[in-house]
Image (cartoon, grey):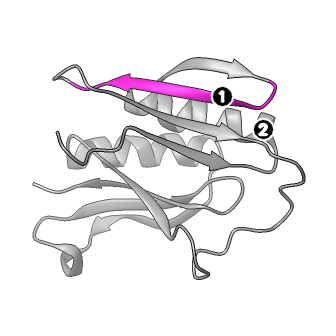
Amino acid sequence: MRGAPHHIDLTVSDLEVSAVFYDAVLGFMGYRRSHEDEHGIDWAIVSADGAPSSVGIVKWRDAARVHDRFSPGLHHLAWRAASREDVDRLHDLLVSVGVRILDAPADYPQYGPGYYAVFFADPDGLKLEYVFEP
């Protein structure tokens, strides 16, 4: 599909801590580790039409600055869920591994009819979303 993300790379402050987090979240979504070296880790998934996509985390120099989604840059990143139940299952997984939930699964009609999502933070405070929209 034209315009679909090919890959996303995120900078993290602690590669090991973030790897545990993204293994859980991306693993739930069907991504699998595809590459790893001293600089970072990539997870890949292939869509039903055969298009690959990947998410990577990298640790560069001294990534000590705290993420502020209200400063210029990335505000948040959202993935599409297969169903409302899929959103609820990810929420349960996030809670079980101690992830900070920003907004629990709920209907968010201000974003569109049937918009159902959970909002959560990665170890560096990056806001992430998992959303079902019929």
Q: At x 20% / y 65%, what residue is drawn?
A: 115
Residue sitting at x 56%, y 33%:
24
Residue under numbered circle 2:
15
Q: Locate residue 34: give its quadrant.
A: top right
Along the viewing direction, whichever of 112 and 64 lies nearer the viewer: 64
Identify which residue, 26 or 106, lies in the foreground: 26
Instruction: Identify whether 27 is placed above or below 99.
Output: above
State the SS at label 1: strand
Label of residue 65 in the image: none
User: Is the residue 60 above or below the residue 128 in the image?
Assistant: above
Q: The residue under label 1 is which amino acid type?
A: Ile
Residue 58, horizontal then vertical, whole percent = 71, 40
Determine the image quadrant of residue 63.
bottom right
Image location of residue 102, percent across then percent down: 53, 68
User: Which residue occupies 20% across, 44% down?
Assistant: 83
Q: Is residue 112 above or below residue 51?
A: below
**Membership of 55 in magenta stretch:** no
Q: Is residue 26 left or right of residue 106?
A: right
Is residue 43 found inside the magenta-colored segment of the image? yes
Which SS does the magenta portion mostly show? strand
Give the number of the disc on residue 41: 1
Q: Which residues are magenta?
A: 38-47
CB-based contact (under 8 Å), mark 1 and mark 2: yes
Tell me the quarter of the image containing the N terminus. top left
Which residue: 52% across, 59% down? 120
